[in-house]
Image (spheres, helix red, strand yellow):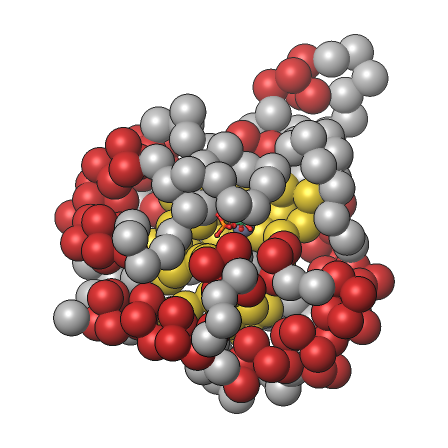
Amino acid sequence: APPAFIAPSILSADFGSLGKACSDTIGHGADWLHVDIMDGHFVPNITFGAPVVTKIRPHVERPAEAYGKGTFDCHMMIAEPKKWVKDFQKAGCDLYCFHYEAAIDSTAADSPEATSDKKTNPKELIKYIHSLGMRAGIAIKPKTDVSVLYDILDNEDKDAVPDMALVMTVEPGFGGQKFMPDMMPKVEALRKRYPELNIEVDGGLAEGTIDTAAEAGANVIVAGSAVFGAKDPSEVIAKLREAVEK
Ligand code: DX5
Ligand code: ZN
């Protein structure tokens, strides 16, 4: 199985001093920073966009290698994932993780004002992300069946295959929600089919839920409130890592 990557979600950081929060978190032992981008359309909340990512990037050293320390893992909870790939690449994103539901948005595709830009084929989108030198991730919401990913992950064209799958363990939109253990069969199914795949879990991960996620086979762990709400964030990060590595 791939190594453990602990990715604190800066959604729970102090937005008033975000740059420092980012560098402190890497100092506390985090591998990646999970950067939650919300547009108020795909999810009922707004966070920030590429200009903010550009400003926090110099606070965290660029990773020396793929998946290395300091990786910016951008979780794109946005309705038009194709539209923002370039901006985020320029801003310093290393891993662009879009939502399957947004990429195949049939509502957008069928509406009279739909343009080909709104309707995006996940495979083409992954190729586009790769062509700009970033890793690609694909995320699924709790109500989306994991089997929609099989066809995408089984593609012979390696350039069109995502580098990570994100199984949401809460409804995307807000930090501090309760972990959904009933998402674990998705993680188990992915781990069984794809022993080397990076499988990320996001939502409600903390000391009390990490064992469940780790046993199911997740290796990329997002944690927002558990890390930023802690008195000692380094202790929480170390405990999450230990649970995945044991
Ligand atoms: C939810 C976000 C998560 C969130 C996790 O929409 O994608 O990344 O910040 O926060 P916690 O760990 O507090 O559930
Ligand atoms: Zn997230």
User: 11 left or right of 231?
Assistant: right
Give 88 or 235, whichever is nearer the viewer.
235
Q: Position of residue 121 (x, y in %)?
A: 57, 36
User: 69 left or right of 52?
Assistant: left
Name the residue rendered at 75%, 62% in the picture. Answer: 15
Q: Does the rendering let one see residue 191?
A: no
Q: Position of residue 79 (x, y in %)?
A: 69, 34
User: 98 left or right of 181?
Assistant: right
Q: Does the rendering let one see residue 36?
A: yes
* Rendered-image quadrant of the C terminus: bottom left
Image vertical order of residue 115 relative to residue 153, above or below: above
Give 211 or 81, whichever is nearer the viewer.
211
Q: Position of residue 167 (x, y in %)?
A: 39, 43
Q: Position of residue 92 (x, y in %)?
A: 70, 71
Name the residue rendered at 69%, 21% in the picture. Answer: 108
Q: How many marks?
A: 0
Image vertical order of residue 155 relative to residue 185, above or below: below
* Rendered-image quadrant of the N terminus: bottom left
Q: Which quarter of the figure has residue 109?
A: top right
Q: Which quarter of the figure has residue 215?
A: bottom left
Name the residue rendered at 45%, 46% in the picture. Answer: 203
Name the residue rendered at 29%, 53% in the picture. Answer: 208
User: 136 left or right of 195?
Assistant: right
